[in-house]
Amino acid sequence: REHNHDSYSGDDNEYLRRCDRADLSEQDDLKCRPAWFNEQIVAVSKCYKDVAKLGKLVLTMFVGLAYRRYIQFYWGSRKVQGAINNMALILGSVCDYENKTELSVKLQKDLERYLVLVHVLMYMNISPYIQEKLSLPDLGKRVMGIDKLLTEEELNIMTYIVKPGHAEAPDKAIIMPGAAGNGPMNTVLVWIQMAFDRALAEKVICAHHSEARTVSICAQFQEHLCDLRGAMATFGFMKQFPIPLAYAHMMQVLVDCVCILCPFAVMYEIDSVVVSKAGFREHDPWATMPLTVFGVVFITYFYQGLLSLAKVLSNPFGEQIDPTTGELKDKEFMINVKQILKQTRCGQFTFFNSAVDAPTCCITETAAAARLEEAENAKDGDY
């Protein structure tokens, strides 16, 4: 009637009777509902269906890409932990604990301390959580069960590496461009190798091993050291190659469009089903409101929830501190770096101290004789 359509003869009662007799199985319900409803909402519903199909595809890809990145960071952390523990196992099994000289004790402690130090420095470089808890000067205090993770001399060297000119320059110091990132870690790796070589030369390690066995141990240690360097460097490379920010922004726009169109499309679909079953004059538009609201909330929750989850997984170590709360963002979802550090430290402690009181059958005759002599001296009061 409003548009003076040919199907309207001027008799309202006759038009209503035609609607009652209409076969709604072929979408004749569209003829009975208001024209504005059919003309506008049908287009919105069609657009929603097409956009939702595209949204499902790209959102699934985004979540999968973010989760894959999360897994890579997690197993990368475990790979670093494994390399450090492998080196601790080698050192702990070849150290001569019967050698009680000051140099021997110092080298053994330094090797253990450097393994802890390089692990902490790695996470100070890539983890916002550790960056919040520790700074370079803090390493001169008790950290991870070690009284001084950095001596005063070592702290000065590290400070000079990170910020050239902000500390007293060590003797023959050379400023290395770009060393602030992996520079401290690589420096400690060099220290570990140098300490290992000195311990080998001073017979602190491999003192009772054959030449062939010593060569094999050195080769294994060098291999694990190189594996450790490569695993730590991988984190820096992955941090430099994140998921493109434009991709995340486009996903946000797409999901927002789906959520905006969702109420109209769901209302139209549910209303069409009800009209096809009850007829236009018999159905109650408000009766479907609870189901419509539930459908809209359900769809919006999952679209926005999956998008938020993908954003969180794309930052496995967490985001920077939220200035409003003073805490890390989404720290409930980030990889538990603190726990990994503790687990690694427990493994190191076990490997370095298991050989101290090893059974007699596990040590050489020379070491067994030295242990027996030490026990007799202690018994006689001469030790």
Image (cartoon, rainbow, N blue to C red):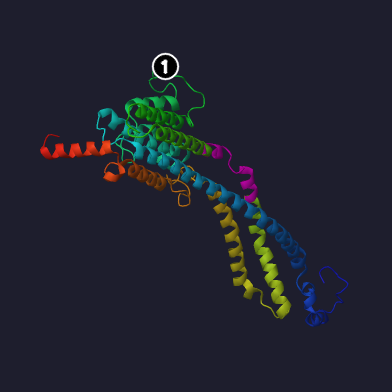
Q: Is residue 274 left or right of residue 240?
A: right
**Relative vertical location of residue 114 with respect to residue 358 in this rendering, above or below:** above
Q: Is residue 292 left or right of residue 370?
A: right
Can residue 281 be seen here? The reply is no
Residue occupying the far left of the picture: 381
At label 1, counting other C-alpha atoms closer than 10 Å, the crowd grade (few under 14, some 14-19, many 20 or more) is few
Most common SS among magenta residues: helix
Can residue 274 be seen here? The reply is yes
Give the residue drawn at x 78%, y 77%. 25
* Occupied quadrant, residue 122: top left
Please provide percent x and percent y for residue 295: 61, 67
Please provide percent x and percent y for residue 189: 43, 31
Which quadrant: the C terminus? Answer: top left
Residue occupying the far right of the picture: 6
Please provide percent x and percent y for residue 371: 22, 38
Of the pair 37 and 143, the residue shown nearer to us:
143
Of the pair 348 and 37, the residue shown nearer to us:
348
Q: Magenta stretch containing residue 245, yes or no?
A: yes
Q: Magenta stretch containing residue 371, yes or no?
A: no
Residue occupying the far top of the picture: 172
Find disc 1 in the rendering and name its residue. 172
Please provide percent x and percent y for residue 285: 66, 74
Of the pair 225 and 311, the residue shown nearer to us:
225
Give the residue drawn at x 29%, y 45%. 361
**Label 1 residue SS:** loop
Of the pair 142 and 304, the residue shown nearer to us:
142
- Under mark 1, the amino acid is Lys
Q: Which residues are magenta?
A: 235-251
Which quadrant: the N terminus? Answer: bottom right
Q: How many marks?
A: 1
**Relative vertical location of residue 310 with respect to residue 49 in this rendering, above or below:** above
